[in-house]
Amino acid sequence: MSASPLFEKHKDTLEKAIAASRSREYWTAYPEMPSPKVYGEDANKNGEVAFKGYLNKAFDLDLPGASGTVGGEKSPYGFDLGVTYPKVDVDQLVSAVEAARKDWGRADVDTRAGICLEILDRVNKRSFEMAYAVMHTTGQGFMMAFQAGGPHAQDRGLEAIAYAYEDMKRTPAMAHWVKPQGKRDPLVMDKKFTIVPRGIGLVIGCSTFPTWNSYPGLFADLVTGNGVIVKPHPGAVLPLAITVKIAREVLKEEGFDPNVITLAVDDAAAPITKELALRPEVKLIDFTGSSAFGNWLEENAKQAQVYTEKAGVNCIVIDSTDNFRGMIGNIAFTLSLYSGQMCTTPQNIFIPEGGIETDEGHKSFDEVAEAIAKGVEKFNSDDERAAAVLGAIQSDATMQRLEKYAAGDNVLLAPRAVPMKGFDNARIRTPLILRATDDSSYTEELFGPISFVVSTKDTDDSLKTVEASVKNHGAISFGIYSTSDEVLAKAEEVACEAGVAVSFNLTGGVFVNQTAAFSDFHATGANPAANAALSDTAYVSNRYRVVQSRWHPKG
C-alpha cells in the first residue's frame, strides 16, 4: 500500500514535533487556550451540545462481540451521565482485533503515521466536546479539563508518534552489503528490514486523566502497527469512547478494518481487565492506577511488555528562599490544583525544625507551616475561583480518605465544602493539611487533597528522607526551595540517585505538578512510581521488532 496522502497533509506537524523533542524547547501543535479565534466562535457551544447529546443514551459504536450494554458514569458535579456502551465478549473482540491488525501492521510507516496524525487532528477540533466529557467524568474544572484532557493530551499523543516514527525510520528498509575479500571477489548481500508489530496493545485508562494518560500508549501502539483495545476506567469512559469512535472513522475512510482499535467497557460488578491482560494475543499493556494492580500486571502478564504508572509519594523540601510570598503562593496553587488528584501533586513538605532563612527574615518551622496553611486557605477563599481550580473529587474512596484524615488531631488546615453555581451537588473540597506525627503517618500515598508538613533535623536530613522515600515508595515530582547553590546541587544529586525529576525554586507560573510535552519527561521509569517515561525511546522501541531478510543478489 502506498503512503497515505494524510502523511503529506500532516508532515509539517510531525517534523516540528520531532525537532521539538530534540531541542526540548517550547512548542505545541494544539493551542491550549479555549479561544474562539482558534477553535471557532461556536466551538464551546457546539461542544457542550455534543456532550449533552450523549447523556442518557446508548453510545453509538458498532463493536465486534457486542451484546447488551454497560455503563454507570457519574459526574463528580452531582448527576448521572446515563450513557451506556456496548458490552463486548472478550473472545470475539480479541479475535476481531487480531484479524484486523494484520493489514494495519503491513502498512508502511508513513501511512500509519499519517492516519494517527489525522486522528489527533480531528480529536483536537472537538476539544470542547472532549473538555465537557473529561470534566464530568473526572471532576476536573472546565479550564483544566479543556487543557489537560484536550490539547495537552493531544500533544502527549503526538510526542509518542514522533518518538516512534523517528525510531522506526532509523533503520533503512533496504541495504546493499559488500564485504571486501582481498584478492577474492567481495561477499555481496542484499538485505531487507521489516518493521514487525508485537500484536495487540491493551490500554487501561484511569479515572482522573483518561486521555492524558492513555494517548501516549494508544498512539505509540497504533503508529508501530499494533492493534489496540482501549479498556477505560468504568468511571471515565466517555472521553475514550469519543476518541475510539473518531479513530475507527479515520481507519475506515482510509481502507482499514476499524477493528484495529476497539473499546472494552466493563463495570465493578463484572470486570474484564485481568482477562484481557492475560490473553496471549495481548503483547503490550499500558496502565495508570494503583500500585496493587500495576504490580499484579507486572507479575502476571508475562506474555506482554507492561508499562505502568503507579502510586508515589511526591515531596517538597524547603531549605530557604529569597521570595517567601512567591513560594507560599506557588505551593498553595500546587496543592489546590484539581484537589491534589494528580500523580505529580506533592504530599510531603519537609521543613527543618530550626526554621528557614527568607527575604522576610528568619521563619520558624511553625511559621512556615502556618504560612502554607494560610496560603492555601486564602487562595481558596473565593468560592468561584476555588471551584474552578479545585474541580470536584472524582471517587468515593478519595472522599472517604479525606474525611478519615480530617478527623485526626493533627490538622493544620481542615477541608471545607465549596459551593458551585449550577451544580448544587458538586463534590468540591479544599485541601487538608496535616502535621506529621511520626514517619509512618506520611510514607504511603494518600491520593487526593491531603498533604503533610514534616519536621526534620536539617536540610541534609530532609534530602536523605526524600531519597529513601523515592527509592522505597516512588515519586514522579520533587521540588526544593533554597538560596544555596550547594544545597541545590545536593538536591540534584539526590534526584539523579533516586531517579525523580526535580524543580528548583518555583515561585511563578510554573508548578511542580505540571509537565510540558516535548520538553519535560513525565516520570523517569527509575523508581517504583513508574517503569516508563512519557516519552522517551524506551517507551516506543519495544512496541515493534525488526525482522531482516537477506540474499545474494543475482547477476
Image (spheres, helix red, strand yellow):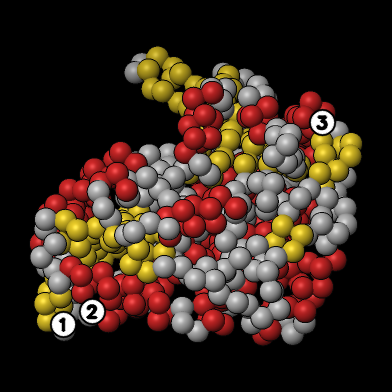
Which of the pair 80/11 is nearer the observer? Answer: 80
Which residue type carries mark 2? Phe
- Mark 3 = which residue? 89
Going 68% across and 84% down the picture, which residue do you hit?
Answer: 36
Question: Closer to us: mark 3 or mark 1?
Answer: 1
Q: Give the number of the disc on residue 206.
A: none
Residue 83, relative to residue 431: is it above or below? above
- Mark 1 = which residue? 359
Residue 328, quarter of picture: bottom left
Residue 410, quarter of picture: bottom left
Relative side of 277 to 40, left or right: left
Which of the pair 542/394 is nearer the observer? Answer: 394
Q: Residues within 10 Å of mark 3 (few under 14, many from 20)?
A: some
Residue 429 visible at all: yes
Which of the pair 240/67 is nearer the observer? Answer: 67
Q: Earlier in the sequence, mark 2 or mark 1?
A: 2
Q: Quadrant of the C terminus?
A: top right
Residue 212: x percent and y percent? 57, 56
Which residue type carries mark 1? Asp
Q: Residues at badges 2 and 3 in contact (C-beta under 8 Å)?
A: no
Going 41% across and 23% down the picture, which residue do you hit?
Answer: 179
